[in-house]
Amino acid sequence: MRMGRTEHVNGIDLHYEVEGEGEPLLLLHGFTGCSANWAHVFETSPRGYELVMPDLRGHGWSSGFDGPFTFRQAAADLLALLDRLGIGRVCAIGLSGGGQALLHMATREPDRLEAMVLVSTAPCFPEPARRQMRSMTVESRTEEDWRLMRQWHRHGDDQIRSLWRHASAMQHSVDDMNFTGAELAGITARTLIVHGDRDPLYPVEIATGLFAAIPNSYLWIVPNGGHEPIFGSHAAPFGSTALDFLRGQWA
């Protein structure tokens, strides 16, 4: 049974969902998504794992949407949550923005991550992503966009507008996501990099660059995969492959 909980960390109420029993597995959703998105990847809790699924700062049920957003701050929130839960070392999966937060965690406190899966993750924002950010205005959103966001984010329309404004503001960001090769080389976690070869935001060269920079990393290019290629027909093969990797079966 999935249970919702909240911890007060770094001045915000950070909501997270817990499901299953076993070793903790941290699941981090993408920017403007929420913890509920993982139900489309793992319909039931994987054997041997307790899923810990936070809503990042400003997302879902979490507060903090009225302040600035950085992935560096999101990582600090997540490390504080792990401290509060008494989790010293963890495996994790990060999707897009969740992967960006994982990169900050893995470079800031390398010993906290045993293994991680980075899906559609970039160490910096290339021009195709910035072009998308420039289009993320409140005025350009469709009724379907509003319908989905109202399902995921539970503090009302002001929260949703704030998230879209944060997304648009990232077009100007130059220091939050700007990892050097030396910083990436300091990552000690076993790392699986999953990337679609048709990702419109992060060209596939982003993934090969991460693979070259992160020691003890593996690369899975998803054929005909777009951004976040782990949903729909991709969900089952992604779930089984990622779990095999995290369990150390690739050693």
Image (tube, grey):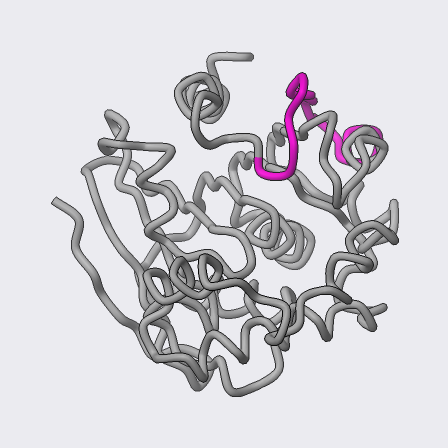
Asked whether 172 or 111 is in front, the reply is 172
Residue occupying the point 24% across, 51% down:
18
List x then y, in percent, for residue 202: 77, 42
Instruction: Please state, as top left, top right, bottom left or bottom right, where the C terminus lies in the image.
Output: top right
Residue with the most extreme left position:
1
* Residue found at the far front of this picture: 143
Q: Does the magenta stretch include residue 206?
A: no
**How far from the left and from the top, in percent, is residue 150?**
36, 67
| 8 displayed left or right of 93 | left
Q: Is residue 227 magenta?
A: yes
Q: Quadrant of residue 135?
A: bottom right
Residue 15 drawn at (x, y percent) = 32, 67
Above or below: residue 242 compared with residue 51: above
The correct choice, above or below, for 53 with respect to 114 in the image is: below
Residue 3: give x, y in percent of width and height. Answer: 16, 55
How many numbered tags mark residues here?
A: 0
Comparing 170 with 247, the one in front is 170
> Residue at coordinates 51% horizontally, 87% vertically from top-left?
66
Horizontal placement of 93 versus 228: left or right? left
Residue that extends furthest to the top in the rendered view of this protein = 250
Q: What residue sits 37% from the left and 42% below the top?
A: 38
Quarter of the N terminus within the rendering: top left
Q: In which quarter of the image is residue 207?
A: top right
Classify residue 217 as left or right of residue 155: right
Question: Which residues lie in the magenta part?
Answer: 210-228
Going 37% across and 73% down the picture, which residue do you hit?
62
